[in-house]
Image (cartoon, rainbow, N blue to C red):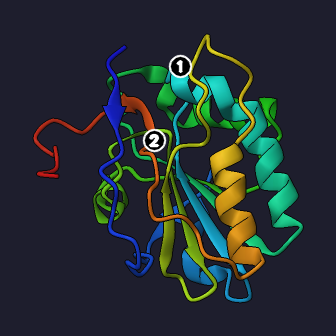
C-alpha cells in the first residue's frame, strides 16, 4: 500500500457544488442540506486499509454530528477496475456493515474529486454554515495498526464550527491510499 497525503485545498474555499448518485441511484447535492450548521465531505472507499482502520468510528462520528445539524456526505471516486471491492456492490455492503446513516455517493467521472482536490482515501473537508472551507485534513493521529481511531482532529474542527470558535490554521494533511484514477484522468495537483 502506498501512502498519499491530502493536497490541502486552501482554507476559505467555497464548497464546490455537485450532484452525484447515492447507493440507490438517487442524486444528492450539497445544496440539499440548506439549513446545516456545518458540512462534512469525506472521500472514502471500500478497499483502502486507511479507511478500514476508521470506518466504524467515522460512521459513529457522522451519526452523532448529523443530530447536531451537520450535513455528512461520503464520496467514493475510485475506479473500481483497480479493486472490484470499490464497486457499487462493495459500497452497499460497507454501508450496511457500518450502518452508514449519511449519503454515500459514487463519483464515476471523478470530477468531484478533482473539484475538491481530493488525493487520498480518506480525505476530509469541513465547511462552515456559509460553505467556506475551515478544515481539511486527517481524522486523527492514528494509522492502521497504530491505536484505536478517535476522530479527534475532525471532531475538534466540527465542534469549533458549531461553537463559532476559531479553527487552527496549522492542520495536518490526511494520509491514505491514493485515489484510483481512471486511466488518463489523473489530476495535475
Q: Is residue 172 left or right of residue 54?
A: left
Q: Is residue 155 left or right of residue 12?
A: right
Quarter holding residue 114: bottom left
Residue 66, image x and y in percent? 81, 65
Quickly name the residue at label 1: 49
What residue is shown at x 16% (from left), y 43% (from top)? 186
Camera sees residue 47: no
Q: Sequence order check: which comes first, mark 2 or mark 1?
A: 1
10 Å neighbourhood of mark 2: few (<14), some, or many (≥20)? many
Secondary structure at badge 2 equals loop
Residue 159, image x and y in percent? 75, 66
Residue 134 in the image: above or below residue 106: below
Query: Which label is found at residue 174?
Result: 2
Residue 144, image x and y in percent? 58, 17
Query: Which label is found at residue 171?
Result: none
What residue is shown at x 79% (from left), y 49% (from top)? 61
Nearest to the observer: residue 188 or residue 173: 173
Nearest to the observer: residue 151 or residue 17: 151
Residue 106 in the image: above or below residue 14: above
Residue 36, image x and y in percent? 72, 81
Quarter holding residue 68: bottom right
Amino acid at each position: 500500500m502506498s501512502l498519499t497525503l491530502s493536497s490541502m485545498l486552501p482554507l476559505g474555499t467555497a464548497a464546490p457544488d455537485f450532484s452525484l448518485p447515492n447507493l440507490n441511484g438517487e442524486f444528492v447535492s450539497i445544496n440539499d442540506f440548506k439549513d446545516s450548521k456545518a458540512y462534512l465531505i469525506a472521500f472514502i472507499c471500500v478497499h483502502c486499509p486507511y479507511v478500514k482502520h476508521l470506518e466504524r468510528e467515522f460512521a459513529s462520528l457522522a451519526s452523532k454530528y448529523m443530530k447536531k445539524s451537520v450535513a455528512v456526505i461520503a464520496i467514493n471516486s475510485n475506479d473500481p477496475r483497480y479493486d472490484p471491492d470499490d464497486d457499487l456492490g462493495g459500497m452497499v455492503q460497507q454501508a450496511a456493515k457500518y450502518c452508514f446513516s449519511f449519503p454515500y455517493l459514487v463519483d464515476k467521472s471523478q470530477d468531484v474529486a478533482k473539484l475538491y482536490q481530493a488525493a487520498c482515501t480518506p480525505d476530509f473537508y469541513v465547511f462552515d454554515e456559509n460553505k467556506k472551507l475551515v478544515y481539511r485534513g486527517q481524522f486523527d493521529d492514528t494509522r492502521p495498526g497504530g491505536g484505536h481511531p478517535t476522530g479527534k482532529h475532525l471532531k475538534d474542527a466540527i465542534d469549533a464550527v458549531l461553537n463559532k470558535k476559531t479553527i487552527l490554521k496549522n492542520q495536518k494533511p490526511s494520509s491514505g491510499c491514493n485515489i484510483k484514477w481512471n486511466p488518463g484522468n489523473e489530476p495535475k495537483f
